[in-house]
Each structure stands twice: as structure tokens, then as C-alpha cells.
Image (spheres, rainbow, N blue to C red):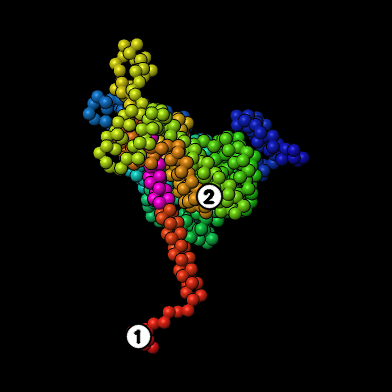
């Protein structure tokens, strides 16, 4: 702790709650003004007067009142959605626009408080979190159609206290207002770093963590770019703002902060000329310099996220914003070595990142020790890792072994799903009948008839047991839902409502496995690595033994026709169709190879016979020919 009284007092003062700080000033420090000299007391009072003048026009950020206003509008939106089921007219657009306008006016006040008045940073941060939460609630509210919210035209203009425009946007879709929030957050952080106290600056990591918890880690990177996405696709049209030189803030001290000065260095600080894209044209040089400190703080926050939930996308973001790529790569590699085996998600992420780094040794080490952590949906990560280690001559054979193992495992998964729809395929009688059908001429009438009878014989018969939910509804006297009445109906169609919801991934793996994507991924991997085509041909021979009916396209077509009538089996149809296509290609390739070998063998035999003839001719004298053209020179 500091030794002099003033420093010691400030350390203690900073650790006190706000109400205790106020009480301490009023009871202990204010009475001291009457005890000091008149000159000192006049200076203190004059300073207080200047601050009073500065903050006399400070916009009010009444979070409690704004929360009550917005919640009232959201309740009215909810009631309107219920009334719209009965009435023909809905006021959803008017209510949405009123809610958005209220938020936007408030956001302008928030920006003025943090950037122009340079105060109330913590309160402004809390207000921005509330605004983000409101937008999230409106976007995800279960109030019917979201078209009004997603297609609402939203013009946004941020103005200084003088009325001059600072920044403007034009969005189609109110969900894009998050860009405005992140833009204001960036101004909040750089202003806080430039003019805030040490105690205030210590709160920035916590603020970044709050943003990450509500808006995700990608929002942290977007803060550096003023809310824009690094791979922005132009969803927002920014209006052309006219900036005058007196709009660029000066570098004055706290007592002169409201006097704008012309800073020559700021003229080059524009989004059009800057390569890093981390700053804005209205910043002064002093504020502009804080972008590097903000970048480092965001980098530290992203590293903290990476230590818990690593991913290839997060690794890429770290590489984009870091100052030293080599140091970042070494740091992330060390982190992954320690946490890669903690979960399946971490394991798949480690494979992806080590593949990007082309670290074959770490990939092989992970696969040898913890390959059991891989799930079917992690196939793309394993395929990328296989491609990576295949480029290393030391592990090329290992890559081919992984390819063969995973390709056959994909086929076994398809076979298991196929047997659930054709449970009698494995009986000896049907196996024998299948061999007889394969011996018949393709497209002949006897074969067509026997194919239909064979598929009819092996198909799984309908179950006589009612669906459990249908039985429960019947016991309670409720009408039987149509989807439950039909056993072929897809009772898991709700999995398609939000295909990006990670909470449903486990259910999708069980009831909607991506067998087609997994198979095609391994086929493409085999075509891309050295020695892969030979492995694919070997795998085809094993597949024919595993699923004999795959040799006959007419049988496969008949089976696909039966499965296509069952919505719950469509994923099996897709996988079987893909497997059939692969087998056709490999069969043609095998035929071409056989023909090539025969051609080479016949060519070699002909060459050998011609060689023997020449040898015999050279050992005996040539025959004497008289007359004819042979005698003509």
C-alpha cells in the first residue's frame, strides 16, 4: 500500500462502495474546506463550478424508467400477437417501430455520455447490455411470424450534443442493431482507456466477459471493427456522413475536454485509409492510440474463452487480431495439449486446429490415445486431420489405414440402418435367393419379378404395437394425432426446425445421423490423398461382401422406392443412394483395370512372339526370291 497519506487514502477510497464514498466525502472531506486557506478553497470551489457547468447538460440514463417503458411495450406486443389470432388487424409493426425508436434515442444518449461527457461508463455498459437483451427477446419471442422484425427498415443516426452527425446506418432488419451497440461499446472502451481512472480501467475485462456471455465470443472481435463482421457480406448500407475538422476530438485534459481542436494526425485516421480497421474517423489521435490496448484486452478475453471452449473459428479470430502469430500459435498449441482430451468437442477442435498448423505428430498422438472421443458428427474434423497427416510421408500409411477403417465403419452404419427397414436380409433363404437373382440377366422379365418378390420378402413387417404416445393419448381419451397414428410418420421432424441448434446434435446423431455426408466425405478424402484410390477399390470389395444387394442397381432402386414412402427413413435413402453411386463407380473402375491388365498381357505376349520370330529368322539364311518387285533397288 502507498506510503503518503493521499495515495493511501485513494487506495482505500477506491475500494469502498459508492454510497460509502459519498458519505465519506460529505462528512470528512467537505468540512476540511473551511479549515484550509481561502485561496485553496476558492480553487476547489471553482473547479467544482467548472464540473457543474460541464455536466449540466448530461443526458439522463434512467435505466429503471427505460426498463419499465420497454417492458410495457413488449407486453403490448405479446398481447397484440394473441389478439391477431382472432382479429384480422395487427399493430405489430407500429409497436415494433415504437420500441426500436425508443431504444435508438436512448442509444444516442448513451454514446454522448461515454464519449462526449466521458463519465458513467459502468452505467452505460449496463444500459447497452439491457438493449442487447431487449433485441434478443424480440427476435426469439414466441409470438408468431418474425417477418416484421426481420424486414423492418431501421435508419440510425448518432449525433453530438451540438447536433452534428457522427455516424449513421440504414438497416433492413432490426436484428442488425447489434452493430450499433458494438460500435458504441468500442467508443466506450477507447474513451475509458484514454481518460478513465485506473479503477475504472480494471473493470474492462469484466465488461468484455459480460458481452461475451450475452452476445457470444464473436461479438468481441466485432467490437474491434466497430460492430462489423470481419467477413461482412454487406447486409448494412452505411450512409455517407459529412465530417468536419471540428468534429474530431482534441487531446485536452479533463478541464478542457469540451473544446474541440483540429488534430492534423487525425485526418489520416479514417476507415478508408486504415489497414487494421480498428478505429473511426471521429477519434482524436490520443483516443486512436488506445485501439491497440483494446485489441490486447479483446485478445486476452478470447484466449480465456479458448481455454474453455476451443474451436477452429476462434483460433482463426485470434490469428486475425493478434500482434505475433507465432506466439499465438505456440500459446494455443500449449492450451490444446492440456484440454484436448477433456471432451469430444475439445478433441474435434484440437484435430481441426492441429490440421491447420500441419502438426502431424500431435494429430497421430491424439488419435492413438483418445480416438474413442470421436462421434459420428466429428467426421469432418477427422477427415481434415487425415488429409493433413497424408501430406507427411512419415504418416502416409497411417492416413490410409484411418481412411479404410472409417470408410468401412460408415458402410457398417448404413448397413445397420438398412437392416432396420429390411430385417430379413440376413436369412439364409433370402441370401440364396439374392445370389440366384444376381445370376439372371439384367432387365429381364424373370429378374424384375423376382426382385420385387425378394424385396417384399425381406422388408420389415409393420409393428402391431401402438406408438407409446398414441397409447397414452388413447388411455386419456384424447384424439389420436395423425403423426402418431401413422407408424411411418416422422415423429422427430421437430429436429429440422432449427438445424443450427447445438442442443439437438445428440438427438440428431441418434435419430437423424448424417450417414450420407460422412460417407461422401471419406470418399472425397480417399480421392484426394496419395494411395487413396487403391483403398477405395479395396473397400468396395469389402462392401460387396458386407451388403451383397448393393451389386444390383435394380434391387437398390426397389428398396429405395419402399423406403421413400417412410418420412422417418429418408436419411437412410440418401445414404443408400450415395453408397450405390460409389459402388457403381468402383465397379466401372475395376472393369477398366481388368481390361487394362488383359490388354497389357496380350501386348506383352505379342511382343514376345515377334521377338521369337525375329530370332528364328536371324539364325537361318534368307530365302532366295527371283523376279518381281523385290529385285528392284
Q: Is residue 619 above or below residue 531?
A: below
**Where is residue 279 shown, x and y percent of the image?**
51, 53
Residue with the most extreme left position? 88
Residue at figure coordinates x 57%, y 35% from the top left: 372
Toward the viewer: 325 or 6? 325
Mark on residue 216? none
Percent position (x, y) of residue 343?
Answer: 57, 34
- 571 or 189: nearer the viewer: 571
**Residue corresponding to mark 2:** 387
**363 or 56: nearer the eye?**
363
Classify residue 542 as left or right of residue 366. Answer: left
Q: Secondary structure at mark 2?
A: helix
> Most prominent secondary structure in the magenta stretch?
helix
Query: In the picture provided, is 533 more to the left or to the right than 335?
Result: left
Rendering coords of residue 247 (x, y %) = 47, 54
The residue indicated by pointer 1 is 627
Mark-to-mark CA distance, 2 and 1: 72 Å
- Rendered-image quadrant of the N terminus: top right
Query: Magenta stretch: residue 513 in it?
Result: no
* Element type where label 1 sits in the image: loop
Q: Earlier in the sequence, mark 2 or mark 1?
A: 2
Residue 134, relative to residue 257: is it above or below? above
Residue at horizontal 30%, vertical 27%?
80
Mark 1: few/some/many CA within 10 Å (<14, 14-19, 20+): few
Residue shown at 51%/44% (left/top)? 404
Q: Nearer the viewer, mark 2 or mark 1?
A: 1
Q: Is residue 355 visible?
A: no
Q: Front-most of 191 and 565?
A: 565
Task: Work out which residue is located at the far right of the displayed protein and give it.
Answer: 3
Look at the image and say whether residue 583 sits in the magenta stretch: yes
What's the magenta region?
572-591
Amino acid at each position: 500500500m502507498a506510503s503518503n497519506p493521499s495515495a493511501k487514502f485513494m487506495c482505500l477510497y477506491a475500494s469502498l462502495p459508492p454510497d460509502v464514498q459519498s458519505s465519506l466525502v460529505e462528512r470528512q472531506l467537505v468540512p476540511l474546506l473551511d479549515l484550509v486557506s481561502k485561496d485553496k478553497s476558492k480553487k476547489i470551489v471553482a473547479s467544482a463550478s467548472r464540473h457543474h457547468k460541464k455536466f449540466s447538460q448530461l443526458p439522463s440514463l434512467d435505466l429503471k424508467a427505460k426498463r419499465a417503458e420497454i417492458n410495457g411495450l413488449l407486453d403490448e406486443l405479446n398481447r397484440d400477437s394473441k389478439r391477431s389470432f382472432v382479429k384480422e388487424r395487427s399493430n405489430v409493426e407500429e409497436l415494433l417501430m415504437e420500441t426500436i425508436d425508443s431504444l435508438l434515442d436512448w442509444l444516442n444518449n448513451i454514446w454522448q455520455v461515454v464519449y462526449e461527457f466521458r463519465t458513467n461508463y459502468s452505467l452505460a455498459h449496463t444500459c447497452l447490455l439491457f438493449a442487447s437483451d431487449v433485441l434478443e427477446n424480440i427476435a426469439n419471442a414466441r409470438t408468431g411470424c418474425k417477418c416484421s422484425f426481420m424486414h423492418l427498415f431501421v435508419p440510425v443516426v448518432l449525433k453530438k450534443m451540438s447536433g452534428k452527425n457522427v455516424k449513421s446506418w440504414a438497416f433492413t432488419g432490426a436484428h442488425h442493431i447489434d452493430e450499433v451497440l458494438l460500435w458504441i461499446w468500442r467508443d466506450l472502451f477507447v474513451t475509458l482507456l484514454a481518460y478513465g481512472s485506473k479503477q475504472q480501467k480494471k473493470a474492462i475485462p469484466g465488461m468484455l466477459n459480460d458481452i461475451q456471455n450475452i452476445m457470444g465470443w464473436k461479438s468481441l472481435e466485432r467490437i474491434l471493427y466497430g460492430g462489423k463482421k470481419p467477413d461482412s457480406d454487406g447486409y448494412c448500407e452505411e450512409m455517407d456522413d459529412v465530417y468536419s475538422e471540428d468534429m474530431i476530438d482534441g487531446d485536452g485534459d479533463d478541464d478542457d475536454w469540451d473544446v474541440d481542436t483540429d488534430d492534423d494526425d487525425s485526418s489520416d485516421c479514417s476507415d478508408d485509409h486504415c489497414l487494421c480497421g480498428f478505429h473511426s474517423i471521429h477519434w482524436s489521435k490520443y483516443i486512436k492510440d488506445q485501439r491497440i490496448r483494446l485489441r490486447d484486452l479483446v485478445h486476452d478475453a478470447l484466449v480465456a474463452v479458448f481455454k474453455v471452449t476451443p474451436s477452429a473459428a476462434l483460433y482463426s479470430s485470434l490469428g486475425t487480431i493478434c500482434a505475433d502469430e507465432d506466439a499465438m500459435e505456440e500459446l494455443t498449441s500449449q492450451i490444446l495439449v492440456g484440454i484436448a482430451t477433456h471432451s469430444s468437442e475439445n478433441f474435434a477442435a484440437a484435430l481441426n486446429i492441429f490440421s491447420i498448423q500441419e502438426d502431424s505428430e500431435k494429430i497421430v498422438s491424439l488419435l492413438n490415445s483418445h480416438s474413442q472421443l470421436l462421434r459420428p458428427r466429428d467426421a469432418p474434423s477427422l477427415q481434415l486431420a487425415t488429409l493433413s497427416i497424408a501430406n507427411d510421408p512419415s504418416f502416409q500409411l497411417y492416413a490410409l489405414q484411418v481412411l479404410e477403417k472409417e470408410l468401412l465403419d460408415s458402410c457398417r452404419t448404413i448397413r445397420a440402418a438398412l437392416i432396420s427397414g429390411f430385417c430379413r436380409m440376413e436369412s439364409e433363404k433370402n441370401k440364396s435367393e439374392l445370389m440366384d437373382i444376381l445370376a439372371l440377366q439384367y432387365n429381364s422379365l424373370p429378374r424384375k419379378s423376382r426382385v420385387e418378390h425378394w424385396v417384399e420378402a425381406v422388408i420389415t413387417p409393420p409393428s402391431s404395437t401402438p406408438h407409446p404416445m398414441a397409447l397414452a393419448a388413447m388411455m386419456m381419451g384424447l384424439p389420436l394425432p395423425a403423426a402418431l397414428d401413422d407408424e411411418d410418420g416422422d415423429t422427430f421432424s421437430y429436429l429440422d426446425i432449427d438445424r443450427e441448434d447445438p442442443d439437438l446434435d445428440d438427438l440428431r446423431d441418434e435419430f437423424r445421423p448424417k450417414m450420407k455426408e460422412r460417407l461422401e466425405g471419406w470418399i472425397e478424402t480417399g480421392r484426394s490423398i496419395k494411395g487413396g484410390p487403391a483403398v477405395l477399390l479395396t473397400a468396395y470389395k469389402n462392401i460387396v461382401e458386407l451388403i451383397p444387394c448393393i451389386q444390383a442397381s435394380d434391387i437398390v432402386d426397389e428398396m429405395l422406392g419402399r423406403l421413400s414412402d417412410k418420412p422417418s427413413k429418408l436419411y437412410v435413402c440418401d445414404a443408400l443412394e450415395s453408397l450405390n453411386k460409389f459402388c457403381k463407380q468402383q465397379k466401372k473402375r475395376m472393369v477398366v483395370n481388368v481390361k487394362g491388365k488383359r490388354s497389357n498381357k496380350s501386348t506383352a505376349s505379342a511382343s514376345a512372339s515377334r521377338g521369337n520370330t525375329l530370332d528364328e529368322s536371324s539364325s537361318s539364311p534368307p530365302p532366295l526370291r527371283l523376279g518381281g518387285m523385290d529385285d528392284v533397288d
